[in-house]
Amino acid sequence: MLAIEVKGLYFYYVKGEYVLEDINFEIEEGESVVIMGSNGAGKTTLIKHFNGLLKPIKGHVKVLGKDTKECTVAELSKLVGIVFQNPGHQLFAETVEKEVRFALENFGFSENEIRRRVSEILKYFALEKYKNLSPFNLSEGEKKRLAIASVLVYEPDIVVLDEPTIGQDAIQRKKIAEVLRGLIRDGKTVIAVTHDVEFAVELFQRAIILSRGRLIADGDVKDVLTDQEILKAANLLPSQITECAWLLRDLGFPNCIVSIQELEEHIIKALRG
Amino acid sequence: MSHFRTTVLRGFEFKKKDTIIHRLDPRAKAVYVFVMSAITLLFTTPIPIIMTFLSSLIVVVFAKVVKEWSSTMKGIIILSLFIFVVNYLVAPTDKLNYAVSMTMRLIALTSIFSIFFLTTSPEDFSLALLKLGVPYEYTLIFTMALRFIPTLAKDLQMIIDAQRSRGLELEKGNIIQRIKRFLPILVPLVIYEIKRSFMVAEALEARAFGAVESRTYFYEIRMKLIDWALSTSLIISLVLILYLYFMNILPEWLFWKVPG
């Protein structure tokens, strides 16, 4: 079954000034997709269509077969969990535990189920020791993890993250990558908006690239994010590994290297002659 | 669900345009706001207030801000209904007249202030206050407050989106439940904006804010002939209206009351 189907999507905030134009793609259940592009390309606007926060001006968006125009945000949010870029826009409760309970209470889960899920998710995100603390006393990395936990706790079928690694140090970034890897392994549909090319090639199978509201590339993450023209059009820099491979092109290194293992193999091969 | 947009705040954002109203000196526009507000507050019958409101429509058209002004007016529909009901309930006599007048007063004042903020850049307004002798620190507070309206609107929209994405349904339940549901919106908004204000203060200090007592300004504002003419005629009109009002020689139809 298709997790998300976007067909002929057009959207504007100010009449006539299109932010998204003729967007078409399908995402299968269990796929991991990264949406990339320059600032103002329409990435966040696009993901806001997945849970009905925004409705298409033209075209349609279907989530697990449901047309978003015919569903409420609450109905769609149960299927699509969106973690927004800035935890500061979301955290409000007196304690970490209450913050995580919030969505479960909104969706009408039973008290026993709420307790079980909250306890599990806090353990999983290593936030258990902070459960009685105010979310505002946490570090930025912990706040980000809490924001993710407060969405994953209700186990949506599709998880969407807006800039999950922005402002995160290497350790927090690693922790977030670990969580996403787990979700992908469990067969969830995971979609992320990011500028972090290294993060994208490390975790995702497919990349969708937007530029000025139009879809300019859609394909295997390795092919898309090693294509110089696409990267240029989307104001993205290649990963350092890819750039290194490009510099060694004359020694027979292929253009589409994205992982350190591949690079290592080719270096060893080149050294052995 | 798009009715949760922060449209009302958009009607107070300055839009740079080249119109006769935009080109007026901010002090002349301040006089306009003062005179029109005084007339609106002077009367408790609807006709003069409606006349003030209608006159503001002409300014809106000349300033080419109909779209922005309309979003503000749309945004206060619910507040107007609330004002109408409350005034109808509390008025001792002439209930309907009082409720209509007070509601029209809100609408007229919103229109007048909206025109001012839509056509006056915060920098111009700040300079006008300085010319009137207000210390720079205070004018800056006001300028920054205006400057941050779009930012505040953006943050508010992001918070609403984030909480609705976690199943918060603002439109569900009775009035008490609905008010309670705004808590997850207000708490992050207040905390976020307080944090932002500290960051802005630090950024200002890092750029030598308050380092010297007398500062210079990049550009100046000057009252032109049209500004003097407008301000003088507005003040004369107000004085005349006040004289006629207190001498009880204004035409009677201005004091017509809504029956009921």
Image: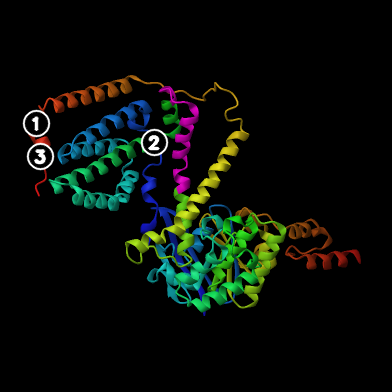
In the rendered image, residue A26, in percent from the top left (x then y), is placed at 52, 72
- Amino acid marked by disc 3: Trp
Would you name the residue on which mark 3 appears? B256
Measure how far apart labels 1 and 3 are at the Cα level: 10 Å
Asked whether disc 1 touches disc 2, contact meaning CB atoms under 8 Å apart, the reply is no
Could you confirm whether marks 1 and 2 are on the same chain? yes
Q: Secondary structure at mark 2?
A: loop
* B51 is higher (above) or lower (below) than B217: below
Report crowding for label 2: few under 14, some 14 to 19, many 20 or more residues within 10 A (C-alpha).
Answer: some
Q: Foreground: A261 or A118? A: A118
Task: Name the disc covering residue B251, or none.
Answer: 1
Could you confirm whether marks 2 and 3 are on the same chain? yes
In the rendered image, residue B118, in percent from the top left (x then y), is placed at 37, 38
B256 displayed left or right of A215: left
Mark 2 vs 3, N-terminal side: 2
Mark 1 vs 2, N-terminal side: 2
Q: Residue at x 39, y 55 (%)?
A: B5
Stretch of the chain drawn in magenta: B130-152
Measure how far apart labels 1 and 2 are at the Cα level: 39 Å
Would you name the residue on which mark 2 appears? B17
What chain is tagged by disc 2?
Answer: B
- Amino acid marked by disc 1: Pro
Q: Residue at x 58, y 65 (%)?
A: A148
**B139 in the magenta segment:** yes
